[in-house]
Amino acid sequence: MKYENILKHIGVLGKFQKILIAGFLLFQLPACCQFIGQVFLGASTDHWCKTPGIADVEANCSSSLGFENALECHADEAQKNRSIPYEMDSDGRLVLSSCKRYAEGEGGSEVNSSASSDVIISCDSGWNFDRSQYKSTINQDFSLVCEREDLPGVAQSVWFAGLLTGSIIWGSVGDWIGRRKTFFLCLIGVSISSIVTSFSPSFEVFTLLRFVTANCCYGAFLMTYVLGSELVGPKQRVMYGSVSAMAFSVGYMVLVCLAYLIRDWRDLQLTMSLPFLPFFMLFFWFPESPRWLISKGRFGEAKKILERIARVNKTQVPENLFDEGEEKTKVPHGQTEEKVTTRPITQLDLLRTPNLRKKSLIICYDWFVVNMVYYGLSLSTSALGINDYVAGFVSGGIEIPGILLSWWMVDRCGRRFTTSSAYTTSGVACLVTMFIPPGVARAVVAMVGKFAAAAAFNLIYLYSVELYPTVTRTMGMGMSSMVARVSGILAPIILILGKYWYPLPLCVFGGSSVLAGLLTLLLPETLGFNLPDTLEEGEQFGKGAGLKLCCAGNTKDDDKTVKSPAEYAALQTEGNPPNDDVMV
């Protein structure tokens, strides 16, 4: 019996799956905080040189100060104005320098008020920081300003390098030792590294620990996503993927609220790391994927797990759980029976045959683009010209309607058309944003781009799961994510280069996203079809598919039964008669 038919008997979304998925969704909250956390951990603040012999001046003035304190604050501000020279900023305004000071202030000597007679030098005694909004950030604690101002971007690139290695390692490990063991290995790693990060004594230690956190956090996230998709029916996969993406968006808004309440980066990092610990309780509920066990020929273990799911769901496992020859081999329709190969399957198998290669390369490019655009827009919210917390909260909140719209459209217009539209919309919004000055209007258009990018991110996860065969599903997802993390490494660098040519980031984000939307139209439609299990099914699925197959009605025959991947290829290319064991 085919796996989808087994799920129909034991429950495509019963009590067992609901409890497990609830745990997976809660895991998204601390995971998202780690993904987006550096927006607040490394927030930029005003800074100026310390001057030896003159008391430190910290900008903590507020209207609530008493009269005497207000006078003292104003005196300190006047002292700062005498010790720091003025310079022109990028907008042509006269502002106090962030990286220069008057040399005459050394040794406690009197500071001259005449800039023309003073010698200006670089900050050689450290910096004072404006702590009115952030009590501390990594930029303040590790002096990541002036000549070191690009290092926070480097740290963010290292974070994405951690995601890259996590994609390479854990995707393959998940297909090797299983989803369950891989998840708990990653959970141990992310719990330890993220908590220790809050005690980092230096920028180098902070960056290294963030690398480890990224590596393990993504591995755990990938296992929950793949397992959740494999435990529910075809229609419920869309629901699970969309709700999972919305949980990530909720995590983004939770992060903004935490950052608003906790202005010290070490306390914030610890607060968003401790919630990983309760997830070790999933050890007693987290099953291995029955679909993965079946693909590995471990039918006895798969049967026990299916019986456990049926017991909790108050259903029954069918008597003829597996077909007679299924435990020996799985053969695509129209081919002769062979012994199952013992050759280990690798990512290269996704590139060996032409149809799988085409699909894999397009999926990888789509992942590359959506990751770059999503995180590029997320990390640059402070450049929109509005309050950091408002911009962050709106940026997270705008994702939810984008995901809901993609959820509604994907079962009506198909995976291909909906995904292509999301990419194209995001790209056009980014290109339009280049011509709008900072402010509310720019923020609105940028949020349209974020809206569409969030929808595209949700859709490409679902689309990839449905296109990759079971035997390489986590491996394929890992490979796609690996490519995406390369763009994640590049995104902060592209934002840094924006200071040399301001429109560059939006030009890159917009142009690449529009191209991704066009390439997505070359992928086959997956709406209404069961997941391919073997490499052979993956290669046959979608061969010769035309652009007309983009809507739900085009994926089904007159008999209203859903066709398997092998039948789909036969019907679209050679007109062969369908197989007898039609999958529902």
Image (cartoon, helix red, strand yellow):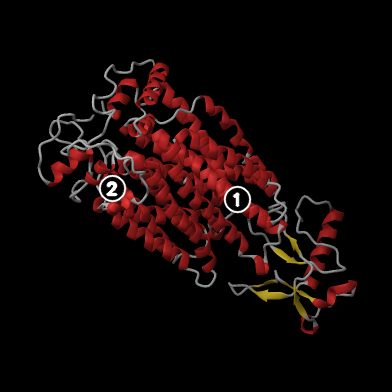
- Closer-to-camera residue (299/283): 299
Residue shown at 48% from the left, 52% from the top: 164
Q: Position of residue 428 (x, y in %)?
A: 37, 59
Q: Position of residue 205 (x, y in %)?
A: 67, 54
| Number of callouts | 2
- Tell me if 461 is positioned left or right of 151 in this view: left
Q: Bin the neighbour count of mark 1 within 10 Å (Cα to Cα): few under 14, some 14-19, many 20 and up.
A: many
What label sits on residue 448 in the rendered view?
none
- Tell me if 222 is positioned left or right of 270 in this view: left
Q: In the picture, which quadrant includes the N terminus?
A: top left
Residue tagged by mark 1? 210
Residue shown at 41% from the left, 51% from the top: 453
Q: Is residue 130 above or below residue 278?
A: below
Q: In the picture, which quadrant includes the C terminus?
A: top left
Residue most extreme to the bottom:
117
The quadrant holding residue 425 is bottom left
Q: Earlier in the sequence, mark 2 or mark 1?
A: 1
- Closer-to-camera residue (419/338): 338
Q: CA distance from mark 2 to mark 1?
A: 35 Å
What label sits on residue 416 in the rendered view?
2
The quadrant holding residue 562 is top left
Q: Bin the neighbour count of mark 2 within 10 Å (Cα to Cα): few under 14, some 14-19, many 20 and up.
A: many
Say which element carries label 1: helix
Which circle, 2 or 1, is nearer the viewer? 1
Residue 252 visible in the current orientation: no
Label 1 is placed on what type of residue?
Arg
Q: Position of residue 84 (x, y in %)?
A: 76, 72
- Closer-to-camera residue (137/6): 6
- Tell me if 233 is positioned left or right of 200 in this view: left
- Closer-to-camera residue (84/348): 348
The quadrant holding residue 147 is bottom right
Say which element carries label 2: helix
